[in-house]
Amino acid sequence: MVGVAASATPRAEAVASGLGSDFLHSREWWGLCAASTLLVLICYGAVLRQQLQLAAGVRPQVLDSLRRAACDMPFVLVLLLLCALSFAPAAVSTALRGFDAVALLLTAGGCALLVYVFPAWPALIARDLTPWAAVGASIGMVRGRWREYIGVIGILLVAVLVFILLAGILIGMLMGLAGQGAVPTAGGLAASRWLMAPVLAAPVVYTTAVSVVLYRAGQPR
């Protein structure tokens, strides 16, 4: 919930500063955006660690999970950078030629490659691996089971998208009934995000649970 609420901080700060779009993409805005993104990743890592502990039959400790998730951040950032490399050909093609059919195919290929590294983050936490070792372990788990993994991940994406769509419609209706103004205030943005946090946190918990299931399914019997 904290991570979801923190994701609204950059926009709320832009409104609170009174600069509006002038504040967006400034040096201060990028710094705030980086800090809020780091907090979101720490919260996601803590939830993922708790899911792994629950699956192993260990009672998780929230503060300990947050502390360890914060300590894991340098390795997690390297891991995410390695995962982003799968889209490097598509990015280069888009920069040189625009987003054409070639860039579309390269993007689809990058998404397909991401399936091989989907269990990498749980592997990094559970086995205390380096990012490179976690990627190697993840590829070993998915190799030979790519169709099963992409099927589960596809269902996960559809479920999350449908949930977010339905939640967005419901929240929009509630805001309309509450008389939400056309121009949001900083306090309104912060309050609305805190109200939405319990709902929007559900897909995060569901995603981490599926990640743990896929990781454990790839372990040798």
Image (cartoon, helix red, strand yellow):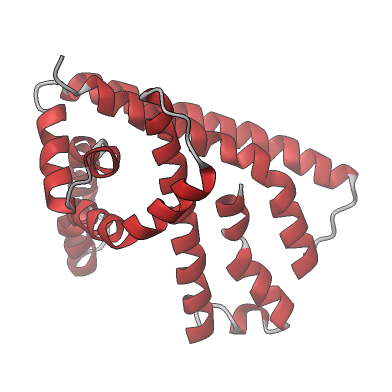
Displayed quadrant of residue 180 = bottom right
Closer to the camera, 161 or 130?
A: 130
Count of residue discs? 0
Q: Is residue 139 visible?
A: yes
- Residue at 26% x, 29% y is 215
Residue 1's spot in the image, x, y percent?
61, 47
Q: Is residue 36 left or right of residue 22?
A: left
Residue 153's spot in the image, x, y percent?
33, 28
- Residue at 52% x, 49% y is 63
Q: Residue furthest top?
A: 221
- Residue at 42% x, 28% y is 58
Relative to residue 184, is residue 129 depicted above or below? Answer: above
Closer to the camera, 128 or 106?
A: 128
Residue 71's spot in the image, x, y percent?
35, 59
Residue 98's spot in the image, x, y percent?
25, 63
Relative to residue 221, is residue 63 depicted above or below? Answer: below
Displayed quadrant of residue 214 = top left
Q: Is residue 118 left or right of residue 211?
A: left
Q: Is residue 103 left or right of residue 52?
A: left
Relative to residue 135, is residue 217 depicted above or below? Answer: above
Image quadrant in which the C terminus is located: top left
Q: Is residue 148 left or right of residue 164?
A: left
Q: Is residue 157 visible?
A: no
- Residue at 65% x, 76% y is 14
